[in-house]
Amino acid sequence: MTVKLSDIEAAREILEGIILPTPTLADGKLSRLIGASAHLKAECLQKGGSFKVRGAYNKIHRLSDKDKGRGVIAASAGNHAQGVALAAQLHNIKAIIVLPEFAPLTKITATKNYGAEVIL
């Protein structure tokens, strides 16, 4: 799949007001290690706990009304699960998320709290 600049610009418009702008933080230790200025994007502060909500929301937003009516299903060990569950909740559609039985309880609970049906 080829991603064009126009795809990125369209996604940015779709996500405007949906996601949180996340800060970049200077990392002194990493900067010294690599001999250059290093900054890390704090996506852990994003809704859903990671950057995964960006792709999930963008994809779900682009579904037809018919497809939205059927809901979505995803398999994930955690962060993608939360992103899909949150994106589905924001679109008022059903989400079924399949998680491994060994998934952390925090991931299971967070996914359920976004309204998804969780299958272990």
Image (tube, rainbow, N blue to C red):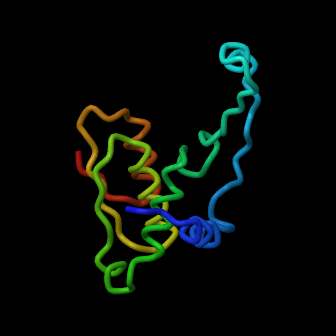
Q: Quadrant of residue 19?
A: bottom right
Above-or-below relation of 100 to 96: above
Residue that appears at 37% across and 33% down: 104
Residue that appears at 57% across and 68% down: 11
Q: Is residue 53 left or right of residue 69?
A: right
Location of the C terminus (image quadrant):
top left
Total label count?
0
Q: Position of residue 69 (x, y in %)?
A: 33, 81
Q: Quadrant of residue 88?
A: bottom left
Q: Is residue 96 left or right of residue 21?
A: left
Q: Position of residue 1 (x, y in %)?
A: 37, 62
Q: Position of residue 112 (x, y in %)?
A: 40, 52
Q: Nearer the viewer, residue 61 or 33?
A: 33
Above-or-below relation of 37 to 47: above
Above-or-below relation of 96 to 78: below
Above-or-below relation of 5 to 61: above
Residue that appears at 58% across and 66% down: 5
Q: Position of residue 113 (x, y in %)?
A: 46, 53
Residue that appears at 42% across and 58% down: 85
Q: Nearer the viewer, residue 88 or 10?
A: 10
Q: Nearer the viewer, residue 109 or 96?
A: 96
Q: Is residue 34 left or right of residue 78?
A: right
